[in-house]
């Protein structure tokens, strides 16, 4: 019923419980799938350390100028006695008796299709192919111990709210000297009561009086760097925006160059006037102002 396919190589594979008999080439196929165990080559199967994620909150000012944080982490670190090898210092490293230095062992498995062999990481040496005549007294042969350590992280100027920075190798230590994981820091910027970020510019509002808008003036404007003087031209309209150059957010990853501060003017119209003020406004009205 399966024209063109020759199943003669699977002798009694499904009926007699004998499993599969693999012809020439099947060893190479399983070597590719399961990591070379049939051919005798060793593949390092030690478990790499897991990544760690933490969150931190910074101020608006820290976002502009950069900051640093210390994180206290309880995590597996490389054993300082055996330096991650898992063996007691001074004792000889030996070929693993279980896998004979291969780092992997063959394991018989059964399925609805019968019995077959697969290659798994050696449970004795964790894939290294080596053992020690005596395990490290501190880490019991694992090559790592759990300790509380402080990690210092610099947060760059210009980072955005919700951005993640990474510290390579600062995660959990790997098994028996394998690669350590990374530390990921999710950065959250607290909202500011006066400033708002848009791209690399900082937005702010400044209130001026009706007379300042009409006649013009010089006003004090609060920037992230301190107070600066800004000229208000005569005839300034409410909603008009003025630019103060170089008082914005730095370009992330660049040593120099900052955005600007964009100042939106709001002209305050008084709700309650004194008698003399009202007379002045009425006289202006007569002049079509």
Image (tube, rainbow, N blue to C red):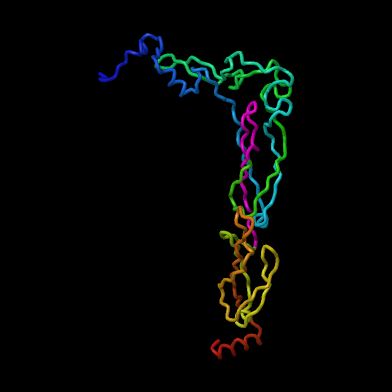
Q: Is residue 212 left or right of residue 147?
A: left
Q: Quadrant of residue 144?
A: top right
Q: Closer to the camera, 10 or 100? A: 100
Q: Is residue 120 above or below residue 198?
A: above
Residue at 62% x, 16% y is: 95
Q: Position of residue 47 (x, y in %)?
A: 59, 28
Q: Closer to the camera, 257 or 289? A: 257
**Type of secondary structure dominating the magenta stretch:** loop
Residue at 67% x, 65% y is: 223
Q: Position of residue 160 (x, y in %)?
A: 59, 53
Q: Is residue 226 above or below residue 1?
A: below
Is 187 magenta? The answer is yes
Residue at 65% x, 47% y is: 56
- Quarter of the image for the N terminus: give it: top left
- Quarter of the image for the C terminus: give it: bottom right
Q: Position of residue 234 (x, y in %)?
A: 60, 81
Q: Quadrant of residue 257?
A: bottom right
Stretch in magenta: 168-193
Is 68 magenta? The answer is no
Q: How many marks?
A: 0
Q: Quadrant of residue 226?
A: bottom right
Residue at 72% x, 20% y is: 88
């Amino acid at each position: 019923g399966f024209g063109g396919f020759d199943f003669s190589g699977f002798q009694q594979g499904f009926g007699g419980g004998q499993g599969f008999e693999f012809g020439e080439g099947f060893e190479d196929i399983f070597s590719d799938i399961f990591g070379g165990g049939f051919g005798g080559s060793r593949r390092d199967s030690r478990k790499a350390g897991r990544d760690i994620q933490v969150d931190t909150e910074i101020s608006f000012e820290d976002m502009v100028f950069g900051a640093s944080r210390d994180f206290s982490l309880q995590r597996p670190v490389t054993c300082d006695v055996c330096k991650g090898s898992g063996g007691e210092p001074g004792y000889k490293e030996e070929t693993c008796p279980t896998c004979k230095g291969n780092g992997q062992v063959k394991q018989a498995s059964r399925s609805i299709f019968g019995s077959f062999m697969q290659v798994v990481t050696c449970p004795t040496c964790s894939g290294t192919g080596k053992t020690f005549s005596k395990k490290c007294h501190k880490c019991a042969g694992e090559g790592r111990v759990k300790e509380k350590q402080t990690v210092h992280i610099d947060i760059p100027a210009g980072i955005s709210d919700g951005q993640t920075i990474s510290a390579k190798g600062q995660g959990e230590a790997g098994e028996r000297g394998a690669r350590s994981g990374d530390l990921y820091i999710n950065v959250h910027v607290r909202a500011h009561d006066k400033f708002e970020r848009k791209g690399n510019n900082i937005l702010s509002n400044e209130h001026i009086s009706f007379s300042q808008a009409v006649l013009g003036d010089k006003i004090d404007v609060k920037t992230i760097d301190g107070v600066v003087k800004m000229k208000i031209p005569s005839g300034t309209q409410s909603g008009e925006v003025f630019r103060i150059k170089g008082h914005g957010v730095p370009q992330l990853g660049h040593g120099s160059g900052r955005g600007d501060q964009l100042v939106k003017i709001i002209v305050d119209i008084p709700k309650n006037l004194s008698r003399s003020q009202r007379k002045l406004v009425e006289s202006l009205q007569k002049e079509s102002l």
